[in-house]
Image (cartoon, rainbow, N blue to C red):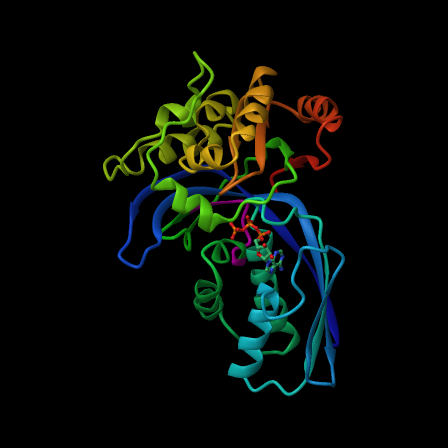
């Protein structure tokens, strides 16, 4: 095989709860991952120069050692003394630094793609150990599933064998947020000024201190509604503990979330460390309708389904 092209999907977090801080500085999470049909496409082609070269049609994606794909290729090439090189072309559709884990997904795709291209014979367990060294969200994308629960830093994956498919409206404002700054801001206690009367699932759930009790209750109930395709109840349980620091850092995002909430979809939340905001809608038509309303103001608006 001389080349191969693979899709690299994005994720949403329907639920993200921070349950503690670890001695190594990372936060302990419980999250519900959903794979969505918003995908980059990555072509891997062998070259004889021995070099790892990356090209991408998105200006904000690094081409050199800072690219997670490059880091994967470098490690595998060194560890397995691969003589040849690889030309990697990324067609980016997933907005960058948005909370959709585009970089992590690309890293997982590179692990699987280069394992095949270079015939390394690595098992999924082997790939997982590489994934853990690259980033917390990488492991989820090694699993061929729509739904999974993530614990630990998010890298301990339990696949949920559910057939549920949801529709979403997804808006990505053109501001970048880095997970590091959001987790740092999580430690601050300053209150977020929610509009009066509005609490919302996430707002009601916010806590000044990190709770360690009843850790799995909410995600268990949410999973049950997901299984039953009860989008209305599911929507009320969408929650993200990073919402408070996201809004503290970029107060304008609360306006966007409230605006979408006023159109009364089943639920609205942030994905990961933001700024991507998504609505759970009862149908594709409803998502399309919201898209028309938001398209005037925002350029990155998508209607996506579970993949
Ligand atoms: P995180 O929560 O880790 O910030 P994210 O999903 O919000 O992830 P990504 O799209 O993964 O955001 O991008 C985060 C940063 O990773 C970007 O600033 C980008 O420079 C860098 N990066 C490295 N490799 C890639 C890649 N292959 N695709 C996109 N971004 C990449």
Whether residue 61 is situated above or below residue 208 in the rendered picture: below
In this view, the residue farthest toward the top is 197
Q: Please determine whether, in this image, residue 178 is positioned above or below residue 254.
A: below
The quarter of the image that holds ligand 1 is bottom right
Q: Residue furthest left?
A: 213
- Quarter holding the N terminus is bottom right
Q: Position of residue 112 (x, y in %)?
A: 59, 66
- The answer to whether any part of residue 121 appears in the image is no
Q: Position of residue 237 (x, y in %)?
A: 43, 26
- Quadrant location of the C terminus? top right
Depth order, front residue of 234/77: 77
Residues in magenta, as a range? 142-149
Q: Quadrant of residue 50?
A: bottom right
Q: Is residue 155 left or right of residue 271?
A: left
Vertical comparison of 155 with 1: above or below: above
Looking at the image, residue 107 lies above or below residue 126? above
x, y percentage for residue 108?
A: 56, 61
Which residue sits at x=66%, y=74%? 117
- In the image shown, does 90 or 177 lie closer to the viewer? 177
The answer to whether residue 86 is seen in the rendering is: yes
**Residue 169, picture quadrant:** top right
Q: Is residue 241 left or right of residue 305?
A: left
Q: Is residue 63 magenta?
A: no
Point out residue 27 in the picture as x, y percentages from the top left corner: 35, 49
Query: Which residue does the image show at 52% across and 49% down from the upper left?
Result: 178
What residue is shown at x 53% (from left), y 40% (from top)? 274
| Count of numbered tags | 0
């Amino acid at each position: 095989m001389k080349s191969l092209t693979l899709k690299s999907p994005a994720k949403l977090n329907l639920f993200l709860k921070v349950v503690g801080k670890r001695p190594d500085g990372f936060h302990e999470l419980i999250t519900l991952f959903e794979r969505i049909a918003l995908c980059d496409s990555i072509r891997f082609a062998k070259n004889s120069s021995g070099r790892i070269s990356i090209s991408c049609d998105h200006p904000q994606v690094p081409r050199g050692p800072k690219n997670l794909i490059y880091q994967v290729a470098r490690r595998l090439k060194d560890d397995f003394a691969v003589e040849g090189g690889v030309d990697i072309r990324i067609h980016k559709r997933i907005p960058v630094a948005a909370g959709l884990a585009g970089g992590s997904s690309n890293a997982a795709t590179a692990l699987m793609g280069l394992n095949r291209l270079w015939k390394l014979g690595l098992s999924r367990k082997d790939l997982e150990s590489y994934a853990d060294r690259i980033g917390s969200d990488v492991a989820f994308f090694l699993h061929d599933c729509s739904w999974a629960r993530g614990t630990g830093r998010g890298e301990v994956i339990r696949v949920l064998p559910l057939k549920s498919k949801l529709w979403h409206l997804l808006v990505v404002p053109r501001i970048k947020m880095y997970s590091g700054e959001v987790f740092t801001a999580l430690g601050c206690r300053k209150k977020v000024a929610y509009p009066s009367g509005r609490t919302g699932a996430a707002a009601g759930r916010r806590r000044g201190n990190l709770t360690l009790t009843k850790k799995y209750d909410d995600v268990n109930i949410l999973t049950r509604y997901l299984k039953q395709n009860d989008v209305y109840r599911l929507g009320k349980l969408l929650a993200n503990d990073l919402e408070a620091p996201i809004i503290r850092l970029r107060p304008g995002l609360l306006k966007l979330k409230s605006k979408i909430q006023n159109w009364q979809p089943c639920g609205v939340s942030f994905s990961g460390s933001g700024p991507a905001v998504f609505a759970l809608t009862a149908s594709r038509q409803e998502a399309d309708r919201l898209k028309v309303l938001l398209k005037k103001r925002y350029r990155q608006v998508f209607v996506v389904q579970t993949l």
